[in-house]
Image: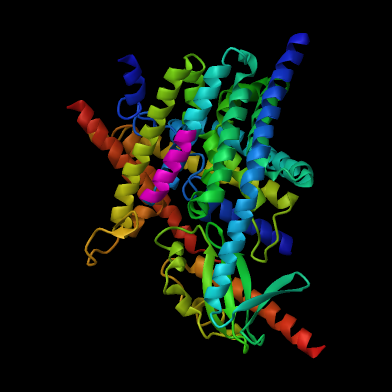
Amino acid sequence: MSAMKEFTKGFIKENPVFIMALGLCPTLAVTSSVENALGMGFAATFVLVASNIFISLLKNFIPSQVRIPAYIVVIASFVTIVDMVMHAFLPPLHAKLGLFIPLIVVNCIILGRAEAFASKNNVYKSILDGLGMGLGFTFSLTILGVIREILGAGQLLGFNVLPSSYQPMLVAILAPGAFFTLGFIMAVINLVKKK
Amino acid sequence: MEFLSRIFTIAIASIFVQNYVLSRFLGLCPYIGVSKKLDSAAGMGMAVIFVMTLASTFTWLIHNYILVPLGIEYLQTIAFILTIASLVQFVEMAIQKMAPALYKSLGVFLPLITTNCAVLGVAILNIQSTWPNGDKFNFIYSVLQGFFAGVGFTFVLVLMAGIRERLDKAEVPESMKGMPISFIVAGCMALAFLGFAGLKF
Amino acid sequence: MKFYLKLGAILLLIASIASGILAVVNNLTDPIIKNNQLETEKLARKEVLSLAITFEEKIDKDFKYYCGKDDNGKIVGYTFVAFGPGYSSTIKTMVGVNLDFSIENIKIIYQAETPGLGANCSNPDFPDRFKTLTVKDMKVDKDGGKIASITGATISTRAISDSINKGLTSLIKAVTNKEGK
């Protein structure tokens, strides 16, 4: 029961983006289309789960004085692996995410989970926590991506979903649209919570 | 002359046209997190300018004199983040010893900067940036880009803090209070900064 | 003191294991990445100069270009890669050139511009704006050339036109030099 909770908390109750406002840079930067959002979400999930596993395994080995640099090395290695593998097998996606792949290193969600959860819990729980948080992150990115792609391009995953008479609201896929969309989603969540 | 015009281009580009926060989406966590009060925003801004300039200096040197000669560019991410983390630690200790007054005002922000993606972002962009004729940025331009990126960050951070201090007194719908209205304000600022995109040199 | 040495040693151990693993992964993925790039360029060359069957690499100083030849080994045109900084990325364009140095076709092979604006340069009808133009028209209309820029993305269009302009100038120089000798 409690294991299930570790997994599901990332989606709604402790959603890293909408509730805790963590990892904002990739959230806003890559969600101009659903495809990019999913790519970034899964890349971050992989890094999160992998580094959670390793940090949980190494927690008794790493002295607490140097834990932060050690975590950073572990996380940065997995990020580099993702970067290289994506460059080799998914070059178009790699080109679109660009700078934001190496920047997964400084995504506060990952270091935050390593410090707050994986360094104190066993491997099994850490995997669930990483998976839940990662998928919660992916889930939030996808919601933003869906809204912005439909409004801004009239498309979903590259297919036209709105009639051609729809004049795309270009601002939605530009920088300001990212801030507006996230602001309104957070407002809706607040509204629901109050009721 | 060309040198001066290039510096001018870097300054305008990193502060306005491609502002690191509003157009490149770097450094958003401190932008939203530390912009509640004007003086803490200014403190954070100064610390970021300082660290970004230093980080640009060291990462450029490390990339071009260690990683490239050894052919291990693929270790870039690890090397850069460790450089930044140790730099921040070192700066924190140095300021604490040498300028306790400054440490009092900047100290609390320094540890936060390690996970500020704008710092790592500018370090990586320095390596990737090219001039229109295909030349890579040299050492001086990289350091300057780091400095001006910090200035651009501070600029929007202070603007945002100024707006949010007033926002406290404004009547905002209940569910929009706090985070949501900050994002809407940020969106409006981004909209204004989009106007700079047409600038041509 | 001993304690700090131990801390350092542990960090060093973790870092060296990490770089070891990365070296292995890099060895595995690097050839694939390079191969992918070559493959894309090869396909793009065929696409922008459809008359040519084989391509021969030529280098003039720093400038690299390819002579496209037909079945009989006759030169039918040239291709080169142009690159220039756009709004948010370095845009790479494969350019196919006829014997009279007018543009046969172009193809964007790398860009990460703003979706909906600059990224529209990857749309299939974008190269039409460049076809048949020569070096003197190879500028955005705002700068006095003949290329209509993408709405809201003058910077991206200008980057592409200017980089092609530069490449074309080098190509003309390289080819005429060779024939003069």
Task: For the N terminus of chain C, give its image quadrant.
Answer: top right
Q: Quadrant of residue C102?
A: bottom right
Q: Residue at x 78, y 9 (%)?
A: C2
**Whole-percent x, y for residue A76 in the image:** 59, 34
Q: Residue at x 74, y 80 (%)?
A: C174
Query: Does the magenta-highlighted stretch encompass residue C60?
Result: no
Main SS of the magenta part reads helix
| Residue A169 in view | no
Tell me: residue A10, above or below residue C151. Answer: above
Q: Residue at x 52, y 78 (%)?
A: C105
Tell me: residue C59, above or below residue C71. Answer: above
Query: Does the magenta-highlighted stretch encompass residue A42?
Result: yes
Horizontal side of B8 relative to B16 (left or right) equals right
| Residue B109 in view | yes
Magenta segment range? A34-46
> A16 and B14: which one is in front?
A16
The residue sitting at the front extreme is C71
